[in-house]
Image: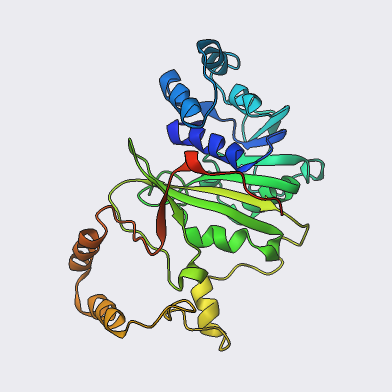
Amino acid sequence: MGLDFNGARFLLYAQRLGVNFERTAMIGRQSLDLTKAELSTSFSDFGYSVNKELIDMVFTRDQGYAEPLLAYLGAQDIHSFDFSAYEGATHLHDMNREIPPQFIEQYSVVFDGGSLEHVFNFPVAISNCMQMLRIGGHYLGISPANNFMGHGFYQFSPELYFSVFNSQNGFKLISLIAFEDRPGGAWFLVKNPKEAKGRVMLVNDEPVYLLIVARRHTKTGIFDTPPQQSDYIATWNPDEKSFNQPPLGVPQDSKRISLRNWLKTKLPFPARYLVQRTIHGDGFNRRFFAPMDPTAVKQMPEG
């Protein structure tokens, strides 16, 4: 578990949004897996003043773990949770099991830098993270998506996080971002499948991570109603518009839909893949993925 170049930039992006790191819980104690030059570049890109003493302090004060970086971002209390003591976590807890009451609603940030895919009982683990947040606090997550088979138990879909961090569970999903884990990989804002009227899917050649920023705004019974996939809800509910219909205000393009349906039913998968890569060379369909510059984002409004 460690913060690489994009992981560190994600924390800087979160602070740019207005996330308060005052009391931070790390799921797994995060190490720093980037170079001093990469951290210095990231600070500069996000408008922070940089000096050699600061960079040296971040890398040496806690034996290469992430606490000094979090402290620089405003964290006054930093706790880490792990199953084992092998990395010196503050608290030992198996996230397969419910979090003890003394940790509920205690943190302004719960940060999972790549641990929950290794926890078999994911619904309990993510519920623990949600309950640990006080009202107004933020969940920050870095999760594997495409091309991570074998890395952990799971690799995750955008649909999962849109279904978990919603008003029914007392949360608002502020930002969901996808990026390829390669030098210079672009960041993309991911659209909600319910709003896009389609499954947000990706076929690409490189490992992809999801970055999640979600805010807890009310206390509710988390998962009192288990999440259901949004297109099935639309299918089951006769009052819902068909998932294949365009959004309101967008004219129906029958020729385009007919062509898409023909491609789906007539072409074998390798041919469909080639067509998709011809249209979207990086695999990121702009219907679902919007390129973004994290350094240009302004602070989010309250509420």
Residue 255: image quadrant is bottom left
Vertical order, 221 against 111 (above or below): below
Taking depth in this image into account, of 166 and 116 the one nearest to the observer is: 166
Question: Can residue 244 be seen here?
Answer: yes
Measuring from the top left, give residue 85's x and y in whole percent. Answer: 63, 27
Measuring from the top left, give residue 168's x and y in whole percent. Answer: 69, 66
Taking depth in this image into account, of 1 and 276 the one nearest to the observer is: 276
Is 43 on the left-hand or right-hand side of 37? Answer: right
Residue, x 77% and y 61% (percent of image)? 220
Residue 228: image quadrant is bottom right
Residue, x 41% and y 62% (percent of image)? 288
Vertical order, 225 against 155 (above or below): below
Quadrant where the C terminus is found in the figure: bottom right
Is 192 on the left-hand or right-hand side of 102? Answer: left
Measuring from the top left, give residue 155's x and y in whole percent. Answer: 45, 52
Measuring from the top left, give residue 27's x and y in whole percent. Answer: 62, 38
Residue 81: image quadrant is top right
Numbered circles on residues, count: 0
Taking depth in this image into account, of 154 and 248 the one nearest to the observer is: 248
Residue, x 81% and y 45% (percent of image)? 101
